[in-house]
Image (cartoon, grey):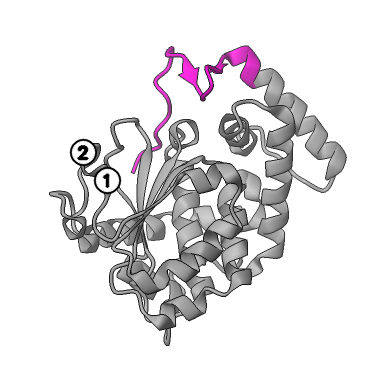
Amino acid sequence: MKKEQPPTGEPVFVGNGVEETAELRTTSIAMVKQWLLDERPDLDIPEESKLILYFLRTTKYDIDKAKRKLMTFLKNREKLTEWFKDRDPFRPEIQELLDIGVFLPLHEKDSLNRQVVIIRTSAHDPEKHKQDDVFKVDKMILDLLMYLDETVSIHGVVAIFDMQGVTLGHALQLTPSMIKKSVESWENYPCKPKLLEFVNVPVHVNIVLNVFRSFMSAKMRERVTISRKGSSLEQSVTLPLELGGNGESYYELSEYWKRTVQENARFYTKMEENVFHL
């Protein structure tokens, strides 16, 4: 997969009518970078790093908000070693989850140019696979997606949580502390979650979803939809076969992302050395 960048020469709008010009981009990055190095002189920020730019886009160039989210993101990367360390794609536990396909970005964007990702919350076996490893693979693919496709930082992400076949065992893995970590990570990631759509939701899972919502900001809660059946996005993107669409199957998407993750093993090594390689 070749790296995707915004078309050159075209204006980049990041929301609320904010246009990203070359001047705004350069001065804002320099301002945040200087603040960050004053706060954390231990950091090494390569010139080609896009991480600060992604946070500026995510916050519509609100400098203070970008600083807060970026600092939380960095602290989470250091604190949550269970998600962000030992991310070798060839580790057996990661291989298994890549084979299963727990986190599957679609190749086609929706009608608003947003990246659609399918999160298969119940595809793994809760007696065999640790929830932390599931989240680790989710973040591995999301990081790679942002690295390969810069436009994700402009238009944001739509997440479809397919809860088909969810069991009590799956629900028990999601403790309140695990849910809190997950929500905080989503809200401080350098891509905007535009919609969180839970589909094929059994009635007994509402308790878990209510815990999710309790940790969300008001804005994030407004972006949550819950459906007992399929996705509302069927009109705006070609969905996989399992969601009633004519797109690639979960198996085909799993094969593609496993191969792509493995081909980019060096990317994960570099990111573990320094997150600013994103």
SS class, disc 2? helix
Query: Which residue extends farthest bottom?
Result: 127
Q: Which mark is residue 235?
A: 2
Magenta stretch holds residue 20: yes
Instruction: Give left or right: position of 113 versus 180.
Output: left
Residue 148 image label: none
Q: In the visual, does 84 lie left or right of 255?
A: right
Query: Hey, what amino acid is under mark 1?
Result: Ser
Would residue 259 be counted in the magenta stretch?
no
Which residue occupies 52% across, 41% down? Answer: 191
The picture places residue 61, in percent across and down from the top left corner, at: 64, 25
Q: SS of the residue at dot 1?
A: helix
Mark 2 residue crowding within 10 angstroms, few (<14) / some (14–19) / many (20+): few
The magenta stretch is 1-25
Q: Can residue 222 be seen in this view?
A: yes
Q: Name the residue under label 1.
A: 232
* Front in this rendered view, residue 60 or 216: 216
Query: Where does residue 259 sit, x and y in percent of width and height?
Result: 32, 59
